[in-house]
Image (cartoon, grey):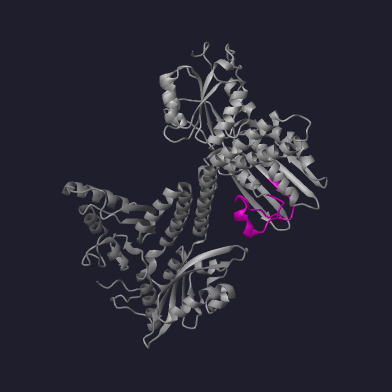
């Protein structure tokens, strides 16, 4: 390669300056050659002034072409002819037109940042920055692997990837500030220092005694020091004993002449943990051994936070999937238990003392149903019934309930807006969520304190939406604050996990906050908890704002059935024998004659053979034909046949193209079954 321009030269050309000056310049220039990014400086002509070795490696320019004085136009034409700008097989006129356009842009040079995919698939990040009255600097970075990693993250969690991409854009913008002074590399060591200070990376040089001889501004700022005062200090003094203990083994490897990379963490002046990834490149001494180290570090605090958020999201999703899968089996079990207990209670003589055994069992079954409901709410699979809710009135109406639930030593303060605010939420779930948060606050204030519930409007901008993981728009913000004991920082990431609790054993199920989290996320909002031990906790969540509800429509009246249930032969389809037995008993008690099928295939045969069937009651998921498939078959055979589906799964939404069939969720009692059947449209004359 032709020698690059010297930093200090006499009018006749040879490099001048003290050996120490020249050595320092060569040292810094060698450091730039170690960078993975390609850097090139062009003068106002524009012609090439200087570059680093990565330029040849990344851009595949012929070595004979890359020399001092090569016009920028030659590089543009070379790229255009080999299809670097997106086109192939261009005519000479098209090439010249493209070159003219790009040269016009160069003469009106503005700071810019772009990415270009080369014909070989390599993705380059290109940044250009003018040097007033002198020329401009271009920096190329190979971001191919980075883009592949971003695509992987996007497939797992698109919203998280957007946040990482936004952070990457901030880092790239900071990198662009570095380029404002990059062209002064060829003029003096002081200008090189300005460039180093503008780099959004932590750069330092340490001698063999582990004392700093150079540090850029970013490196000094990261440690809360001035870059002039850091020189002369030891690594241990700057890092502190704990962080130094983390990196000491790597420094020993570097002292042996090995290039090393590692990550470490430390606590900054604000008391927050920060993370960095460092690469240490030893500088060999002419006398043998190592005379110093180049240090390049990157702040990866945000990246660590993004990775932790991704892991947490994947864990929550796995728990939700497990919960939804278990719901079907638990609901079938509870259907058998509650159905048989109700039947037993109805058949046993009254006032014989059986109630004291039956009622606790029924109560336990109901608690089991509520437990499943809470787990499904956490996993965002429990169906909600959202409607426009005037949240100020709802919170005000809960004040009496809250005062009874909390001790007299807790003062309740409501900070409600004067105007009406409507949110699109399930009102019952919202009440449960507020009550759960209030009870948690009560338990955190055993000696009394203040519970504050406040409401406000909140607009989420598109940029903020990436961070809070909700669509941009208007929201209602709830703040539930207490003056209690607070929560330790290490426990905050686990608060929304099911069955995790900070209370004593037996004092809580650990489902309260999990239910709140699931309800808020399922409602299209988000939630976060801030807490300081000894000072209290603030729980803030947002839910979508809504317009005022329209006037309620007139109640539809269904024609009364003109034929008694005894004349309606019912086909019951259920693959679980014990569940089928319970439902058959309930139908019989309601007066319906019943025939049974254990799967959809048997049921189809009965529908084709038995003309007297006047009602179909079917489970949703079965071997052979599922409930919805069976319903479509029944609609084809008998368009007017009333159908009721039952399901033990969390959701019963019909797939696209299937009929809209009423669905009753397990577990249910006879009264719920009767209400669901009463809502069906029976023909005037039953089948005969």
Q: Is residue 214 above or below residue 182?
A: below
Q: Is residue 431 above or below residue 548?
A: below
User: In which quarter of the view is residue 520 placed?
Assistant: top right
Residue at the image position 24 percent from the left and 51 percent from the top: 99
Residue at the image position 66 percent from the left and 38 percent from the top: 366
Pick the front one: 426 or 200: 426
User: In which quarter of the view is residue 256 placed?
Assistant: bottom left
Q: Is residue 648 left or right of residue 81?
A: right
Residue at the image position 26 percent from the left and 67 percent from the top: 68
User: In which quarter of the view is residue 296 placed?
Assistant: bottom left
Q: Position of residue 94 (x, y in %)?
A: 20, 46
Quarter of the rendering occupied by the N terminus: bottom left
User: What residue range appears in magenta?
Assistant: 480-508
Residue 178 visible: yes
Q: Position of residue 644 (x, y in %)?
A: 52, 25
What secondary structure is the stretch in magenta mostly built from? loop
Q: Position of residue 603 (x, y in %)?
A: 45, 27
Furthest residue toward right: 408
Residue 675 visible: no
Q: Is residue 501 above or below residue 457?
A: below
Pick the front one: 88 or 94: 88
Q: Is residue 515 left or right of residue 77?
A: right
Q: Is residue 332 left or right of residue 287?
A: right
Q: Position of residue 572 (x, y in %)?
A: 52, 27
């Amino acid at each position: 390669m032709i020698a690059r321009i010297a930093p200090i030269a006499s009018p006749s050309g040879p490099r001048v300056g003290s050996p120490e000056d020249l050595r320092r310049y060569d040292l810094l220039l060698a450091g730039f050659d170690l960078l993975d990014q390609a850097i090139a400086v062009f003068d106002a002509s524009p012609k090439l002034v200087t570059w680093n070795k990565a330029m040849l490696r990344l851009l595949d320019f012929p070595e004979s072409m890359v020399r001092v004085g090569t016009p920028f136009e030659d590089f543009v034409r070379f790229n255009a002819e080999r299809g670097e700008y997106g086109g192939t097989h261009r005519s000479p006129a098209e090439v010249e037109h493209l070159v003219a356009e790009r040269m016009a842009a160069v003469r009106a040079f503005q700071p810019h940042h772009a990415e270009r995919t080369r014909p070989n698939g390599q993705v380059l990040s290109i940044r250009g920055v003018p040097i007033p009255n002198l020329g401009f600097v271009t920096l190329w970075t190979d971001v191919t692997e980075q883009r592949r990693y971003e695509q992987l993250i996007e497939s797992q969690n698109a919203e998280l990837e957007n946040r990482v991409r936004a952070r990457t854009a901030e880092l790239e913008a900071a990198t662009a500030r570095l380029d404002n002074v990059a062209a002064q590399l060829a003029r003096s060591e002081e200008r090189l220092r300005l460039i180093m200070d503008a780099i959004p990376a932590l750069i330092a040089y340490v001698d063999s005694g582990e004392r700093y001889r150079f540090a850029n501004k970013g490196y000094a700022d990261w440690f809360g020091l001035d870059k002039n005062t850091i020189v002369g200090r030891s690594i241990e003094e700057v890092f502190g004993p704990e962080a130094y203990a983390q990196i000491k083994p790597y420094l020993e490897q570097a002292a042996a002449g090995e290039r090393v990379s590692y990550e470490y963490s430390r606590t900054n002046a604000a008391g927050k943990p920060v993370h960095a990834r460092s690469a240490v490149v030893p500088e060999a001494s002419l006398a043998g051994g190592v005379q110093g180290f180049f240090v390049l570090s990157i702040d990866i605090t945000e990246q660590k936070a993004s990775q932790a958020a991704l892991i947490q999201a994947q864990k929550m999703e796995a728990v939700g999937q497990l919960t939804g899968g278990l719901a079907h089996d638990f609901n079938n079990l509870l259907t058998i238990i509650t159905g048989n207990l109700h039947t037993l209670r109805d058949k046993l003589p009254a006032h014989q003392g059986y109630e004291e055994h039956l009622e606790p069992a029924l109560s336990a079954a109901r608690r089991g149903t509520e437990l499943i409901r809470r787990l499904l709410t956490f996993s965002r699979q429990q169906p909600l019934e959202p409607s426009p809710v005037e949240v100020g009135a709802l919170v005000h109406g809960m004040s009496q309930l809250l005062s009874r639930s909390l001790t007299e030593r807790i003062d309740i303060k409501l900070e409600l807006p004067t105007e009406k605010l409507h949110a699109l939420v399930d009102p019952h779930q919202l009440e449960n969520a507020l009550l759960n948060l209030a009870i948690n606050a009560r338990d955190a204030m055993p000696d009394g304190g203040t519970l504050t519930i406040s409401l406000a409007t909140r607009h989420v901008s598109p940029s903020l939406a990436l961070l809070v993981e909700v669509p941009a728009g208007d929201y209602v913000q709830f703040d539930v604050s207490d003056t209690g004991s607070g929560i330790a920082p290490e426990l905050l990431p686990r608060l929304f996990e099911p069955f995790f609790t900070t209370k004593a054993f037996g004092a809580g199920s650990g489902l309260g906050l999990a239910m709140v989290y699931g309800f808020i996320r399922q409602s299209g909002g988000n939630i976060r908890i801030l807490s300081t031990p000894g000072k209290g906790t603030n729980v803030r969540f947002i839910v979508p704002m809504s317009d005022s509800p329209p006037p309620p429509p007139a109640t539809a009246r269904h024609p009364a059935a003109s034929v008694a249930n005894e004349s309606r032969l019912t086909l019951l389809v259920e693959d679980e024998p014990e569940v089928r037995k319970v439902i058959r008993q309930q139908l019989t008690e309601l007066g319906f004659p019943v025939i049974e099928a254990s799967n959809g295939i048997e049921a189809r045969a009965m529908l084709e053979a038995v003309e007297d069937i006047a009602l179909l009651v079917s489970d949703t998921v079965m071997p052979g034909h599922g409930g919805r498939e069976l319903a479509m078959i029944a609609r084809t055979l008998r368009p007017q046949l009333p159908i009721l589906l039952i399901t033990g799964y969390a959701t019963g939404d019909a797939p696209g193209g299937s009929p809209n069939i009423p669905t009753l969720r397990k577990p249910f009692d006879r009264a719920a079954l009767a209400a669901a059947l009463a809502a069906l449209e029976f023909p005037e004359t039953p089948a005969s």
